[in-house]
Amino acid sequence: MKIAILGAGNMGLSFSKSFLKYELIKPENLHLITRNESKFSKIAEEFPKSTISIFDDVEELNADLIIIAVKPQDFQHVAENFRFQLKQNQMVLSIMAGIKIEKSRNYYIIRWS
């Protein structure tokens, strides 16, 4: 299984560390996506075998599971500005507090390829 985590902040990195610690996935099957270029090198240092990307550079996501781990106040910006299209076989999991499923689904439903 390949996992992409959109939002490599505290929550996203916490999930990532757990996936690797308990060997749920291999490091090379983890894709961490951050919007902060300043955090890129620190994340790359901590996850040397994983793919690390800047949000604006991601045009395609090769992942079975996409975890949305952005702050709720950043959700609309992220949803309106991601350039990749979701594929029918990809699962999206949101761990954002306060964002209802209907709201997130409305953004993603138009992004299926």
Image (cartoon, rainbow, N blue to C red):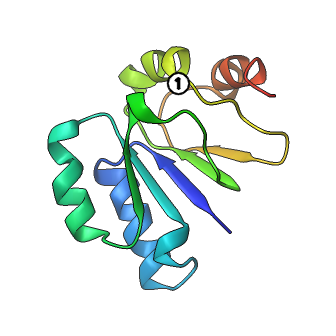
Image quadrant for the C terminus? top right
Vertical order, 12 against 25 (above or below): above
**Amino acid type, residue under disc 1 in the picture:** Phe
Which residue sits at x=71%, y=56%? 64
Which residue sits at x=68%, y=29%? 101
Q: Position of residue 94 (x, y in %)?
A: 58, 41
**Horizontal relation, residue 80 to residue 43: left or right:** right
**Horizontal relation, residue 13 to residue 36: left or right:** right
Q: Position of residue 102 (x, y in %)?
A: 71, 21
Residue 18 figure quarter: bottom left
- The residue that mark 1 highlights is 82
> Does dot 1 land on a helix, a strand or a loop?
loop
Vertical order, 17 against 81 (above or below): below
Choose between 110 and 74: the one closer to the eye. Answer: 110
Which residue sits at x=49%, y=17%? 81
Image quadrant for the N terminus? bottom right
Vertical order, 80 against 41 (above or below): above
Q: Position of residue 12 (x, y in %)?
A: 39, 53
Tag count: 1
Characterize the local packing of mark 1: few (<14), some (14-19) or many (20 or more) Cα atoms within 10 angstroms.
Answer: some
Q: Position of residue 33 (x, y in %)?
A: 41, 45
Which residue sits at x=37%, y=21%? 73
Furthest residue in direction right, as rendered: 88
